[in-house]
Image (cartoon, helix red, strand yellow):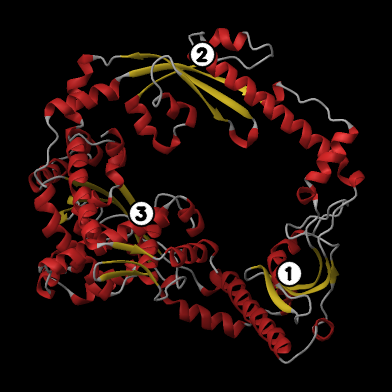
Amino acid sequence: MLQSLRRTLSSWIVLGLLGLIMIAFIITGFGTRGGGIGDLGGGPERLASVGSMTVTEQDLTKRLNRELKGAQQQQADLDLPHFIRMGAYEGLLDQEIMDKSVLAFAQKQGITASKRMVDAEIATIPAFQNAAGQFDQAAFQQAIGRLGVSEADLRQDLMTDLVRRQMILSLAQGARLPATLRTYYTTLLLQTRTGAVAAVPTKALPGAEPTEPEIATYFKAHQAKYTIPERRVLRYAPFGWNDVVGTVKATEPEIEEAYKAAGAKYGPKETRSVAQLTLPDQAAANAFVAKVKGGKSFAAAASEAGFAAGDIVQAEGTRDEVARKVVPDIAAAAFKSAQGAMVGPIHSPLGWHVARVEKVTVSAGKSLAAAHDELAAAIQQRKAAQLLGDVLNKVDDSISDGANFDQIVSTYKLKVIDTQPVTASGEAPGTPYQLPAEAKPLLKSAFEMDPDSPPQVETIAQGQSYAVLAVRQTVDPTVPPLAQVHDRIKADMIAERSAARAKQLTDQLVAKINSGTPLRDAMAGAGVALPPVQPVAMKQVDALQAGDRLPPPLRMLFSLPKGKARAMAAPNGAGWIIVQVQDIAPADQKLVVPLAEQLKQRFDESQRSEYAEQFIRSLQKELGVKRNAGAIARLKQKLASGT
């Protein structure tokens, strides 16, 4: 149950029960930004099948794209490879299979969601309505355009949600965790575990230096480890932005034309500052508006209603900029109201929204003279980019027409650079040579090319610099002479012996502690100087709240019985960590009942999630799920690499 409680908020089942709300939430402007998957992986290959339904590459990539956009609102620098490393690929594949399982079972049982039902759901979403609260086709098209989904995809999502609700809501809606169990689990959450963490670093137990015969024997047995991999000499000719930007300039007629085309950008501009608050019901929203109109400040009224300053959404800018932070209908009304006016209440799936127009600012805009340099720079950038693109196309055409490397560099007067023989990682073993930074992006292509193949154009920095690339020479893998790797072998042997001593000592210490020797006494009697023992104490509830941020030694604290110890490897081969649970203090009973009541909804959600998940698993077993392991692995690699 505690593990279930931890995953409740991210559970597909719980999200499924609120599916329509989440769809409306996204469409109203939250969870959308650029940087999605684009066209990667959109093929028809089947990843899995369940009953009569299949999960294709296109199904999964669409889902990944939507979830990535939402996650980027919380972590702006999140990219697709990192998103996949976090486990999103496997998790969303499971969710997609669950969706298909529900649809396949529903189809078998004759449960459907008609077009009329989907139309009715669409008509209830505020983002698709006009000021009179009626469905508006233009608003609908604009909203799904902002989200970046097609009407067909939206309808499919809504249809799946309607079927899911018909099947699961009745099953899970009444699920409640009994009060006795709620109290029991809360008691576990409030237990305090006290223990100690000790370290056995490998550097504390230096390995014995090997003899020369031992080094020679080790080298003979591990030659593959020290073999220098294939090396290649890269021949490349860089060119790019800096070569063309100084050759183009903006003319006065071009600047004047750009100024006219910019239109509203340089004309008078109106911006507004808006404060928005979301309340749970219409009565509370009306009362809030009355207080502010009666003279209270927006912040004071929010405080009296039980809200913190952080609950007030502050938006400032043009209408479009404000609409990206507040409910679109609030933004529209705010730009029709005077400074100081109250807007709302306006209803959405999230609640009842009220807002105040804090400030109205009207700027006069820029004259042609004031915008001249800005326009000139933009035109120069555009012309340089176009010229660079022309050069790229001409070089590509020359290669296609059969021109060799020397002919291309001669035609375009490019500087040629030859590297030293380097490995695929850019190293030149046994030499002090450092590969130029600009050549590092070329390594992957250089080691994929056939040495006798024609030159090719490669990107060094997208939109900035490129290179004509060829492979001048290839050096086969080579076993170096012992003298060249002697010191490295010696260091490796000492490190291995040190690690073995550390592991042996760690095992001995754990055995002593589990036999009854106090941890501090065992560490003090180890015979070597070890770092001080660190005391630790934590409640289960704090560990659950920390989630993945909880350090592994503290996580282990909650998997051991009282008095017992266990060892785990330290990161990067640095040694071993010993964790012991020394005491488990019972919960403060004064806190149990209040926390159990506070967590009632969370426990009930977890119970509903368990019921619904078991139902899905059982129908999957009945229908039969088949996974195409090869296709799943290929798509993951393709998306993770962006190829």
Residue at image position (49%, 57%) is 79
Q: Amino acid at mark 2?
A: Ile
Which of marks 2 and 1 precedes in the sequence? Answer: 1
Q: Is residue 133 above or below residue 176?
A: below
Residue at image mark 2: 513
Q: Which of the two residues, 399 or 77, is positioned nearer the viewer here? A: 399
Q: Is residue 568 above or below residue 353?
A: above
Residue at image position (40%, 27%) is 559
Residue 180 location (% of width, % of height): 13, 25
Using the rendered image of the protein, determine whether residue 199 is visible from the camera's viewpoint: no
Q: Secondary structure at mark 3?
A: strand
Which of marks 2 and 3 precedes in the sequence? Answer: 3
Quarter of image, res 550: top left
Tag shown at residue 316? 3
Q: Amino acid at mark 3?
A: Glu
Residue 29 location (% of width, % of height): 30, 60
